[in-house]
Amino acid sequence: MSISNDSGAKVVAKGIAVVAFLFMLHSGYSAREYLLYSKSIDRQNLSLPIEIVLECLGAMAVMTIAIVCGVGELKPISYEAEMKRYSVDGIYSRPSFQVFNHRGRYLRPLKSVGSVTEK
């Protein structure tokens, strides 16, 4: 049984991704607070503590894995698979490509339907 077919596993994976996203937001907030605190005490070294960096990287890794596991079955993107859904009549009979005002009328003389011009 694969994860892509089990809807319960998809829900769990999406929940894990949301929690990981919240951890990423927390690490961003912590980084901002740390930098503001460092500037307020006139500290010259403004590098982030390793805990904040590890929290952000760990949350990003967990969120990436959760999103990959929680995604459904992928659709094929080949041209043949896309064209199986359409018929030839449906492809070539689109009204947006029908042109009624074209230069063909200038290439041959106009013929009147009801009159005979032969003598």
Image (cartoon, rainbow, N blue to C red):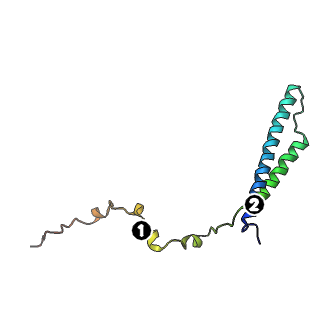
Percent x, y of residue 6: 73, 67
Q: Nearer the viewer, mark 1 or mark 2?
A: 2
Along the horizontal axis of the image, is 105 left or right of 4? left
Q: Which residue is mark 2?
A: 68
Please rate how many residues cluster around mark 2, counting C-alpha atoms within 10 Å: few if below 14, some from 14 to 19, many from 20: some
Q: Residue furthest left?
A: 119
Against 13, residue 50 (above or below) is above
Q: Please report the residue visible at 62 percent of the width from the left and 67 percent of the height from the top.
A: 77
Dot 1 and dot 2 residues touching (CB under 8 Å) = no
Q: Please report the residue visible at 76 percent of the width from the left and 51 percent of the height from the top.
A: 18
Against 13, residue 36 (above or below) is above
- What amino acid does circle 1 point to? Ser
Percent x, y of residue 116: 13, 71
Q: Residue furthest front?
A: 8
Circle 1 SS class: loop
Along the horizontal axis of the image, is 114 left or right of 55? left
Circle 2 SS class: helix
How far is disc 1 from disc 2 in space, using C-alphas?
40 Å
